[in-house]
């Protein structure tokens, strides 16, 4: 019974993650920027795609040179489903990944 439920859930997740709109439409990157993405210190990047998807992310090193050194990441991404744009903003760091969006239950 558990395997049946797992398989049903996996098939449902696959169906829901299928591309929206015209499956034959070619998606291209319409804008892309990168800054200091060489693995040292912080970084910044962004891109936009022809299907309306966008992403921006920046990171900075916190407590550099100590045992507590980590990255503090801030960003957002958006996507379009059935003509409606959904925006997610997030942070990630010592306290984990935290996302906010109007469509995410609180």
Image: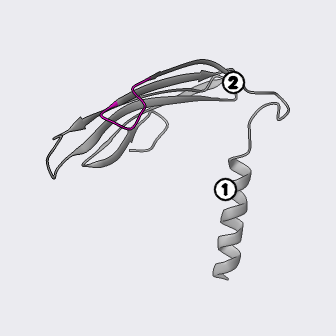
Sequence-wise first label, 1 or 2: 1
Q: Nearer the viewer, mark 1 or mark 2?
A: 2
Residue holding disc 2:
51
Q: Mark 2: which secondary structure?
A: loop
Estimate the x, y position of residue 6 in percent, counting from the top left.
65, 72
Q: Tell me what residue is drawn at x 70 percent, y 58 percent.
A: 12
- Residue drawn at x 60%, y 26% is 53
Mark 2 nearby-residue class (10 Å; few <14, some 14–19, many ≥20)? some
In-front residue for pair 2/34? 34
The residue to which callout 1 is attached is 13
Q: Is 69 drawn above or below residue 60 in the view shown?
A: below
Q: Which of 63 and 22 is in front in this view?
A: 63
Question: What separation in Å lies between label 1 and label 2 (alpha carbons)?
Answer: 22 Å
Q: Give the range drawn in magenta.
A: 35-42
Task: Answer above or below: position of 47 versus 38.
Answer: above
Q: Which colour scheme is used?
A: one colour
Find residue 92 and report its horizontal and vertical position in percent: 33, 42
Q: Could you tell whether 98 is left or right of 77 in the image?
A: left
Classify residue 18 as left or right of residue 87: right
* Residue 55 x/y as whole percent: 51, 28
Seen at 79% across and 27% down, the residue is: 26
* Identity of the residue furthest to the top in this view: 31
Residue 56 is left or right of residue 22, and the answer is left
Please identify the quarter of the rendering in which residue 7 is found: bottom right
């Amino acid at each position: 019974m558990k395997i049946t439920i797992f398989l049903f859930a996996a098939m449902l997740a696959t169906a829901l993650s299928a591309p929206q709109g015209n499956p034959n439409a070619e998606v291209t990157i319409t804008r892309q920027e990168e800054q200091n993405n060489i693995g040292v210190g912080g970084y910044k990047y962004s891109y936009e795609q022809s299907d309306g998807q966008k992403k921006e992310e920046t990171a900075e090193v916190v407590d550099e040179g100590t045992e507590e050194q980590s990255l503090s990441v801030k960003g957002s991404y958006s996507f379009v489903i059935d003509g409606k744009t959904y925006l997610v903003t997030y942070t990630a760091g010592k306290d984990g990944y935290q996302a906010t969006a109007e469509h995410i239950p609180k």
